[in-house]
């Protein structure tokens, strides 16, 4: 049980997914998050990448947001769109970062890592604040 093919004919032992006694807290905030780990691993491989500039062949991202469109009441009340100015500022900043990334042939640089982690940490903080409300 608890795995593909478990239970039934395979007679797998049942798993116990309860929290061990005495543990009341989640993981330590000192541990790296998956995103932080990904960034650190990616940084370690940066010196091994070829420095020759190749054309970008990855995912194409297009900005199709109509900034003049009227926003409905449901959109304006949603948690991710409390400030249209801030939202469009973030979209513009991320699109410029993406265009720079494409221009470099799909390679991240130190400022990309910092922006990525800053955005990630801000999002985590906002989610934590929403949970506490």
Image (spheres, rainbow, N blue to C red):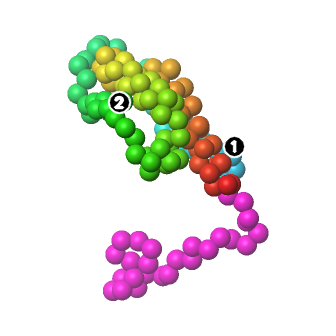
Q: Secondary structure at mark 2?
A: loop
The residue lying toward the viewer, choosing from 128 and 6, is 128
Left or right relative to 100: residue 16: right
Q: Which residues are magenta?
A: 1-26
Q: Residue at x 44, y 78 (%)?
A: 1
- Residue 45 appears at what percent x and percent y? 44, 27
Decide whether the magenta segment is chiefly helix, strand or loop: loop
Could you tell me which quadrant the C terminus lies in? Answer: bottom right
Q: Secondary structure at mark 1?
A: loop
Q: Residue at x 33, y 24 (%)?
A: 106
Q: Say if 16 sits above or below 83 in the image.
A: below
- Residue 67 visible in this rendered orientation of the protein: yes
- Residue 11 appears at what percent x and percent y? 40, 85
The residue lying toward the viewer, choosing from 83 and 56, is 83
Q: Say if 72 sits above or below 58 in the image.
A: below
Q: Where is mark 1, residue-wise?
A: 30
The residue lying toward the viewer, choosing from 127 and 16, is 127
Can residue 117 be found in the magenta stretch? no
Q: Where is mark 2, residue-wise?
A: 68
Q: Residue at x 31, y 16 (%)?
A: 103
- Residue 7 appears at what percent x and percent y? 39, 82
The quadrant holding residue 63 is: top left
């Amino acid at each position: 049980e608890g795995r593909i093919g478990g239970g039934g004919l395979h007679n797998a032992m049942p798993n116990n997914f309860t929290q061990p006694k005495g543990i009341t807290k989640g993981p330590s905030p000192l541990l790296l998050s998956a995103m932080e780990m990904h960034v650190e691993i990616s940084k370690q491989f940066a010196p091994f990448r070829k420095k020759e500039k190749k054309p970008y062949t990855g995912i194409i991202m297009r900005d199709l947001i109509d900034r003049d469109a009227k926003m409905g009441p449901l959109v304006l009340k949603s948690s991710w769109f409390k400030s249209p100015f801030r939202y469009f500022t973030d979209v513009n900043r991320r699109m410029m970062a993406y265009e720079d990334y494409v221009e470099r042939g799909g390679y991240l640089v130190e400022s990309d890592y910092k922006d990525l982690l800053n955005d990630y940490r801000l999002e985590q903080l906002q989610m934590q604040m929403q949970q506490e409300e």
